[in-house]
Amino acid sequence: MKKSILITGGAGFIGSHVVRLFVNKYPEYRIINLDCLTYAGNLENLKDIEDKDNYVFSKVDINEEKLLAKVFNDFQITDVIHLAAESHVDRSISDPLAFVKTNVMGTVNLLNTARNFWKDLGNHLFYHISTDEVYGSLDNGGYFTEDTPYDPQSPYSASKASSDHFVRAYANTYGMKTVISNCSNNYGPNQFPEKLIPLCIHNIKEKKPLPVYGKGENVRDWLYVEDHARAIDEVFHNGLPGETYNIGGFNEWKNLAIVELLCKIMDERLGRSAGESAKLITFVKDRAGHDLRYAIDAKKINTELGWEPSLTFEIGIEKTVDWYLENEPWLKGVTSGEYLHYYKAHYS
Ligand code: NAD
Ligand code: TDX
């Protein structure tokens, strides 16, 4: 049977790269991008593929039971890749319930809809996209492996951990064919400028303060978003049912070092004198419960599925800066309106 794949959250940052990759690489599949277009969803991210014959967009909230069932029926959905989520840790601190609604209840609603629609659960795949944050914080060294016990520390990671547990429970209880991948921090084109890297690129451009939480010593492992999309392609097609795959960039950076690197690249690109943008660095109050370090051990996906990052961070970060500088209308579009309210409430 021809695949008819429901990709949720396809108008967001990572989802748009996954949708593009699948639409272009698999013309024989029908790709249904289901997204309710929150502040983070943006159809501009998919302008280049919106007219393709194998692509459909459906504006639906994953909590809307009846509409979701209709989409499964109308498009005879064969598989799901689930990315729709509230994704920003700081917003989860100020509004945890929104994260429970979408990340927990929405995921369970999606699981129910798939379970009700698919007559033979063994023939369909529910692929859940998750985060390394479910494993907690690596305060004493080491790496997250697929066997690291869950220890979520923020409302965001608690909601993602809960959704992961529900996916595994549906596999165990109902025999649903599922797979989960947990990825480290993504960066690249189309990321909403509430997240560290695009926020700093935007602020450097505008000569606004660069807010570094605490002392800037927290460590994250960064992966270029297209490499994550390639990993998702690999796991979707070749991952074993019931398995978990950790995805990471083997690329740890302290936050302050990233901000300094961005300042250096932007000084070069904008013809500013060396050190000019770094003067914008401003240490601000730390994030509540700020996880110290995340680091993924991505050996399993590397040895079992042959995936590895294709870009070094040095190249990926330059490509990213260039994309934001070349796509001023995109950046302008998302940094007006609601963004200004968020920015003012969060940073002043
Ligand atoms: P994002 O915030 O950029 O995009 C989320 C998308 O989901 C948006 O298009 C939004 O409109 C949509 N959405 C939100 N609530 C919805 C709902 N109720 N119904 C339908 N659509 C809804 O997020 P992202 O950074 O692209 O993350 C995508 C997924 O990957 C998330 O599940 C996230 O937890 C996971 N993840 C993200 C990262 C990262 O570094 N960004 C790393 C690992 C895992
Ligand atoms: O203004 C800032 N200043 C700052 O110092 C912001 C927005 C962030 N930070 C710090 C907090 C983190 O240590 O930078 C680091 C990265 O922050 P974010 O970009 O908000 O990402 P993070 O909290 O690490 O979570 C991201 O990676 C894992 C995504 O938002 C999640 O969706 C994903 O699961």
Image (cartoon, rainbow, N blue to C red):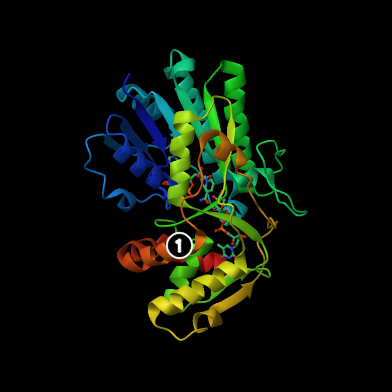
Within 10 Å of disc 1 (Cα), the crowding (few <14, some 14-19, many 20+) is few
Q: Position of residue 91 (x, y in %)?
A: 56, 54
Spot the residue most to the top: 119
Q: Position of residue 244 (x, y in %)?
A: 59, 33
Q: Could one spot residue 341 in this view of the protein?
A: no
Identify which residue, 271 or 111, lies in the foreground.
271
Residue at the spot 57% in from the left edge and 49% down from the top edge: 184
Ligand 2: give its quadrant.
Answer: bottom right
Q: Quadrant of the C terminus?
A: bottom right
Q: Quadrant of residue 211?
A: bottom right
Residue kind at label 1, given as amino acid type: Ile
Residue 104 higher or lower than 281, as above or below? above
Q: Position of residue 29 (x, y in %)?
A: 31, 30
Q: Position of residue 90 (x, y in %)?
A: 58, 57
Residue 196 higher or lower than 45, as above or below? below
**Position of residue 261 in the picture relative to residue 142 (left or right):** left
**Position of residue 117 in the picture relative to residue 301 (left or right):** left
Q: Quadrant of the N terminus?
A: top left
Task: Look at the numbered disc 1 and give the secondary structure of its residue.
Answer: helix
Q: How many marks?
A: 1
Q: Could one spot residue 187 in this view of the protein?
A: yes
Q: Which residue is mark 1?
A: 315
Identify which residue, 150 or 62, lies in the foreground.
150
Residue at the spot 62% in from the left edge and 54% down from the top edge: 93
Residue 110 higher or lower than 206, as above or below? above
Residue at the spot 49% in from the left edge and 69% down from the top edge: 200
